[in-house]
Amino acid sequence: ISPRYRQILGIAASPEWLTVEDFTQMIHAEEVEQVKTALQDYLAKRAPSYEVIFRAQHSKGHLVWLLSRGVAVWDEQGQPVRMVGTIMDITVQKQAEEKLQAALNHLNQFKTTLDVTLDSVFMFDADMLQFFYVNQGAVNQLGYTQEELLQKMALDLNPTSSFAGETYTDALMMLLVEDSQKPALTFETIHQHKQGHWIPVEVFAQCIQLSAETKYFIAIARDITEHKQAETKLQLAKT
């Protein structure tokens, strides 16, 4: 057993060799069969190589992730005599992978939450205003597929819209100014459905700056058709 092998698993200076039973006892119970199968398949020449990832128990009690590779020494009859191999401590790598997977799981949960939101949610880059994310609410509200919307820019939803004397583009660009007093905007405009009719919406838009080079917009559009209809009825009732 090499000094590095002993260091990884906290094995004492003796014995000089490890038996298969000794090695198996250090393997986490959930991975024993996996390791045994990988070894048996290799020794039976059903697999071209022996390589397996598993958890093992350090002598101090904690678990370490190992990548084990080995080759057999065969006798003249083609029978394995012994194994010569290496192990690599990949605990840090596996922990990073687990953190990444946990982050992806949270991201998927967040995306699922956005998709079940009735409002339309758009994310688009600050340069070309090209959509890179739209939720299911936007698909339902506008009648386009997600793929179709991702081919569009924010202004495609209504290139002629304006509000408070500003164009849609001018207003968004104000959010990019470093000393802007407008961290976000809320305004009313209209979006055009795929079938051609117009949908009055209230839009909340905010610029997200991750770094000096990375900026994007998030916009949430709520269909206010019923609200507008109620306003119209109220005005008619007053006349």
Image (cartoon, rainbow, N blue to C red):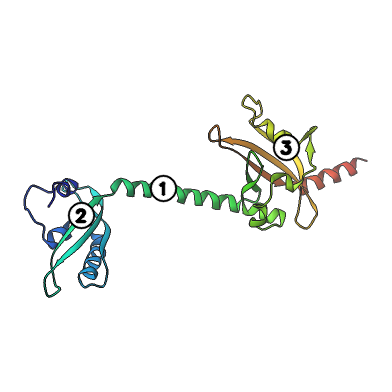
| 95 sits left or right of 121 in the view | left
| 100 sits left or right of 77 in the view | right
x and y, in percent, of residue 102 in the image: 42, 49
What residue is disc 2 on? 86
Residue found 75% across the figure and 56% down from its top? 194
Label located before the other in sequence (2 or 1): 2
Element on which disc 1 rests: helix
Amino acid type at circle 3 is: Thr
* Residue 169 - label: 3
x and y, in percent, of residue 110 in the image: 53, 48
Q: Nearer the viewer, mark 3 or mark 2?
A: 2
x and y, in percent, of residue 92 in the image: 31, 45
Amino acid type at circle 2 is: Thr
Q: Of 171 and 73, which appears nearest the observer?
A: 73
| 148 sits left or right of 166 in the view | left
Q: Where is 73 relative to 233, above or below?
A: below
Q: Of 49 and 200, which appears nearest the observer?
A: 49
| 85 sits left or right of 201 in the view | left
Q: Quadrant of the C terminus?
A: top right
* Residue 100 - label: 1
Element on which disc 3 rests: helix
Contact between marks 3 and 2 (CB within 8 A): the answer is no
- How far, Cα to Cα, is label 3 from label 2? 61 Å
- How far, Cα to Cα, is label 1 from label 3? 36 Å
Where, by quadrant of the figure, is residue 45 drawn? bottom left
Q: Where is 142 relative to 77, above or below?
A: above
Q: Nearer the viewer, mark 2 or mark 1?
A: 2
- Label 2 neighbour load within 10 Å: few <14, some 14-19, many 20+: some
Label located before the other in sequence (3 or 2): 2
Q: Of 121 and 74, which appears nearest the observer?
A: 74
* Residue 165 - label: none
Label located before the other in sequence (1 or 3): 1
